[in-house]
Every structure is written in structure tokens, then in C-alpha cells.
Amino acid sequence: MMSIKKNTKGTEKIISVYWFAILFIVAAAIVYMTASFYGKPYDVRQIEADLLTNKVAGCVSQAGYLKEETLEQGFKDDFPGNCGITFGVEDSYSAEEQYYVELILKDFYSQEKVLETNAGNSKLESFCNLKGEKLPFCLKRSFYAVDKGNNKYQADILSIVRKTEKNAQ
């Protein structure tokens, strides 16, 4: 009867070694997954450019109609202020501005420019036709609007977000 008790204790010792091995494997897997998930930053430049474009579009038109103040001279002079846009970055990696936005409003039929304004770092526009992961993200969108006199316009918005040091690693 003594030999059965010895085997039982030996079996418990073997099971406890396997138990610690399984715990170690699970803990290592959790650490690996966490490190791979948080080790690389999210690239949110596309989302930021889309939000910037939507902000400008909402500033220029509402429900398909061009806002009256858009065609006034004061709108062009203080474009970011009139649209409530600030280009402040939460933690700047360089002295250059990280954003650029351009609005071109054209007559629908003649394609004559009625309004052309921009804000931000205009040097970023030269990167738009290039391909690469560590280049600024460019987003160009167009929409159509009518004014109260039933004149039709095409609005072209170019939004560029740089932030390559933070997002494209």
C-alpha cells in the first residue's frame, strides 16, 4: 500500500511541472501579443485628412447649398479661422507645420475659379504625386453645391497630413 502513495506523489510532481510549463507558454503568448499590438503606432493620417476635408466641406456648404459667407472676401482672408480649423499638433516632431488644406471653388459650367484659398504648409503639396509609405498622406475630394440664386459650383478640397515621424514608422 505504501507504493501507491509514492506513485501518487510522483504523479502530482509531474503534473505540477506541466502546469507551470503551460502557464509560462500562456504568459509568453500574452506578452508577445501585447508587444506586437502596442509596439507599432497606428497610422491615422488618412482619418485625419478625411476629417479635415469634412470640416472644410461643412464650412463651405450645408445640405448641398453653398453658404453665403463663402463667397465674401473676408472668408478667403481668414480661411482657417472662418472654418474653425487649427493646425496645432499635440506634440510636434519638427518646426514645420504638419497640415495643409486647399479649397478651390469653380463655376460648374465654365470651370472658372470663383474662390481659391489655402492654409498650412504649402510645401507638402509637392509630395502628393509620389508613392511611398513615409510620405505625407494626400486626399483630394470634390463635391457640388448650389447657391440661393441657383448657380452651380464645384468645390475641390485637397487635404494633406504629414506627421510621418509619428505615424509612418
Image (cartoon, rainbow, N blue to C red):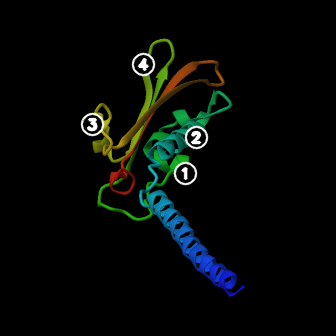
Q: Callout 3 environment at 10 Å: few (<14), some (14 to 19), or many (20+)?
A: few
Which residue is disc 3 drawn over? 126
Residue placed most toward the observer, 52 or 31: 31
Name which of mark 2 and mark 3 comes first in the sequence. 2
Residue placed most toward the observer, 61 or 78: 61
Task: Where is residue 86? Give x, y as percent.
Answer: 48, 55
Residue type, label 3: Ser
Q: Is residue 58 above or below residue 98?
A: above
Label at residue 84 = 1
Residue depth check, mark 1 versus mark 3: number of the one nearer the observer: 3
Name which of mark 4 and mark 3 comes first in the sequence. 4
Residue placed most toward the observer, 89 or 33: 33
Q: Is residue 78 visible?
A: no
Q: Is residue 25 above or below residue 69?
A: below
Q: Callout 4 environment at 10 Å: few (<14), some (14 to 19), or many (20+)?
A: few
Is 132 positioned to the left or the right of 139 in the image?
left
Q: Residue at x 65, y 83 (%)?
A: 3
Q: Element type at marker 3?
A: helix
Give the quarter of the figure containing the N terminus: bottom right
Name which of mark 4 and mark 2 comes first in the sequence. 2
Residue type, label 4: Glu
Disc 2 to disc 3, C-alpha distance: 26 Å
Determine whether label 1 and label 3 are within 8 Å by CB.
no
Which residue is disc 2 drawn over? 59
Label at residue 98 = none
Q: Residue at x 54, y 44 (%)?
A: 51
Task: Where is residue 84? Give x, y as percent.
Answer: 54, 51
Determine whether label 1 and label 4 are within 8 Å by CB.
no
